[in-house]
Image: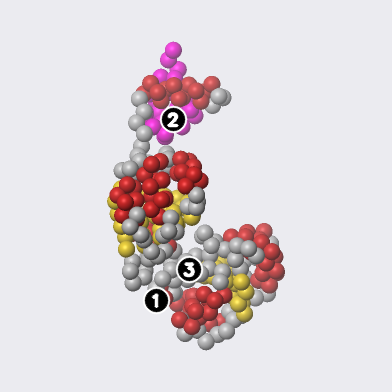
């Protein structure tokens, strides 16, 4: 069996009882960085000394098949350096291979930087998306932001403290200077900080220099206002592309918040 184990993102006290119990009994641990895992074992006072295997971005595809075969006969605990494996960390390809081979995969829930940042942000949590690490280069970041410019859900990103100011400046340019942003720094650690403001305000703040692990939470795009005439034109355009009038009216009503009946009747009127 493959066991995904969530590890503390900063505070060792956040390690769950199930994680500690599993670390005490398993004979094999596949870890993003075995040195970090050794520190974790010491910090939690684990007396068990499991076999430690490196599982990282550079070897996961190659190692997955062997680990899946071993998991048929013994439990293999998968750990990232902090948080949940597979979430911007190694583990996905292993789980993918295990699922394809019908090998059981289970999970030890626990700390997650994504959900922690979202929860404390004060931004809407009912619908959100996680976009992983922001690109290193400004041009690629702006392209990514442009694709997300109309995203209505709250967005969560990871970023390097060294690039944070530049990323926020790009964000202000593409999303608009007033877009609400929250920067979560060093979550669960001694110097935890949650900084809220507009994209422009936080870009200026970050320009002074920021340290630590960074999560950025960004408000979704505000709803666009559509005139009834423009929305009806959109329905007619969809109909011309082959969509049934009723279905087109339903789709545009969901996009604009306008009445489906008004859109349907307007599209039929000539």
| Front in this rendered view, residue 31 or 168 | 168
Residue 121 lies in quadrant: bottom left
Choose the circle earlier in sequence order: 1 or 2.
1
In the rendering, at what x and y percent does residue 55 appear? 61, 68
**Pointer 2: what residue?**
252
- Residue name at image x 33 percent, y 66 percent: 192
Indicate the quadrant containing the C terminus: top left, top right, bottom left or bottom right. Answer: top left
| Front in this rendered view, residue 235 or 48 | 48
Give the Cα separation between the discs numbered 1 and 3: 13 Å
- Residue name at image x 31 percent, y 57 percent: 195
**Pointer 1: what residue?**
13
| Front in this rendered view, residue 225 or 197 | 197
Choose the circle earlier in sequence order: 1 or 3.
1
The relative height of residue 74 versus residue 263 in the rendered view (above or below) is: below
Task: Count every numbered label the image shows and give the total.
Answer: 3
Q: Is residue 97 visible?
A: yes
The relative height of residue 192 versus residue 172 in the rendered view (above or below) is: below
- Residue name at image x 42 percent, y 64 percent: 213
Q: Is residue 246 a member of the stretch shown in magenta?
A: yes
Q: Which residues are magenta?
A: 245-270
Classify residue 27 as left or right of residue 122.
Answer: right
Choose the circle earlier in sequence order: 3 or 2.
3
Q: Is residue 263 visible?
A: no
Q: Secondary structure at mark 3?
A: loop
Q: Secondary structure at mark 1?
A: helix
Indicate the quadrant containing the N terminus: top left, top right, bottom left or bottom right. Answer: bottom right
Give the Cα separation between the discs numbered 3 and 2: 43 Å
- Residue name at image x 44 percent, y 74 percent: 16
């Amino acid at each position: 069996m493959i066991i995904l184990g969530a590890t503390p993102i900063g505070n060792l006290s956040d390690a769950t009882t199930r994680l500690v119990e599993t670390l005490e009994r398993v004979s094999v641990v596949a870890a993003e960085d075995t040195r970090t895992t050794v520190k974790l074992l010491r910090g939690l006072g684990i007396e068990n000394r499991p076999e430690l295997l490196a599982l990282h971005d550079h070897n996961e595809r190659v190692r997955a098949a062997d680990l899946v075969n071993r998991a048929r006969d013994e439990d293999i605990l998968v750990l990232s350096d902090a948080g949940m494996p597979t979430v911007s960390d190694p583990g996905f390809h292993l789980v993918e291979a295990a699922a394809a081979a019908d090998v059981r995969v289970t999970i030890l829930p626990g700390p997650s930087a994504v959900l922690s940042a979202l929860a404390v942000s004060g931004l809407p949590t009912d619908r959100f998306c996680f976009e992983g690490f922001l690109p290193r280069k400004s041009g690629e970041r702006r392209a990514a932001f442009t694709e997300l410019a109309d995203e209505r859900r709250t967005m969560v990103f990871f970023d390097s403290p060294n690039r944070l100011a530049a990323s926020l400046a790009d964000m202000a340019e593409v999303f608009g200077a007033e877009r609400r942003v929250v920067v979560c720094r060093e979550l669960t650690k001694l110097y935890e900080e949650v900084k809220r403001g507009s994209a422009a305000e936080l870009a200026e703040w970050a320009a002074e220099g920021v340290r630590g692990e960074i999560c950025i939470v960004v408000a979704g795009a505000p709803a666009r206002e559509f005139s009834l005439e423009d929305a009806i034109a959109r329905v007619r355009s969809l109909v011309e592309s082959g969509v049934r009038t009723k279905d087109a009216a339903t789709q545009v009503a969901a996009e604009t918040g306008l009445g489906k009946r008004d859109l349907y009747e307007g599209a039929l009127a000539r």
